[in-house]
Amino acid sequence: MDWQGIVVHHSASRDVPANTIDSWHKQRGWNGIGYHFVIRKNGNIETGRPIDKQGAHAKGRNDTHIGICITGKLNQTPPTAEQLHSLMKLLRGLRARYGFDLESIEGHHDNCPGDLFPMRLVKENLER
């Protein structure tokens, strides 16, 4: 795949494993989990859709952007410190591998990954 960026999401649910999200997405008629990575509350990074396959997570960007989902309702509760630490580690690795600039890291839409997700802070920390 010729990845051009990353889209960050939240699950808008309780803390669930990637296989639960996989089941939800299959119920919607998809080929399985649409995200490439899921970051749990404890910071564990679980793999979802293989990185060499197109995602199913952001209309118009599925074939150009890697999908990362942070579990939780980030409109109600901010991500945990462990989630943010793991996200930073993952983003640094993906940026090194694919050469993404900061502008290519974006949220799904206005309400996703949630009002309490610190996108500006994440990008500032990636610059360091």
Image (cartoon, rainbow, N blue to C red):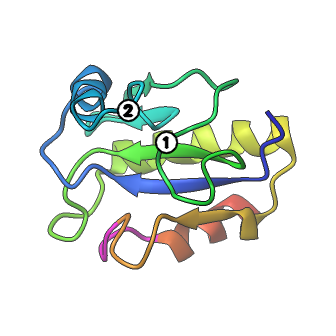
Question: Percent position (x, y) of residue 53?
Answer: 64, 26
| C-beta proximity under 8 Å, tags 1 and 2 | yes
Q: Quadrant of the C terminus?
A: bottom right
Q: Quadrant of the N terminus?
A: top right
Taking the image as drawn, is residue 32 in sight? yes
| Dot 1 or dot 2, earlier in sequence | 2
Q: Residue at x 47, y 64 (%)?
A: 108
Q: Residue at x 26, y 38 (%)?
A: 28
Quadrant of residue 71 within the rendered picture: top left
What's drawn in magenta, residue-wise? Answer: 114-118
Question: Percent position (x, y) of residue 52?
Answer: 70, 24
Q: Nearer the viewer, mark 1 or mark 2?
A: 2
Is the residue 4 above or below the residue 47 in the image?
Answer: below
Q: Circle 2 — which element?
A: loop
Q: Circle 1 — which element?
A: loop
- Tell me the tag on residue 56: 1
Taking the image as drawn, is residue 128 in sight? no
The residue identified by callout 2 is: 30
Name the magenta segment's main secondary structure. Answer: loop
Q: Amino acid at mark 1?
A: Ala
Is the residue 51 above or below the residue 13 in the image?
Answer: above
Quadrant of residue 32 within the rendered picture: top left
Q: Amino acid at mark 2?
A: Trp
Q: Nearer the viewer, residue 3 or 102?
A: 3
Question: Percent position (x, y) of residue 117?
Answer: 37, 68
Q: CA distance from mark 1 to mark 2?
A: 8 Å
Q: Residue at x 60, y 38 (%)?
A: 90
The answer to if 11 sits in the magenta stretch is no
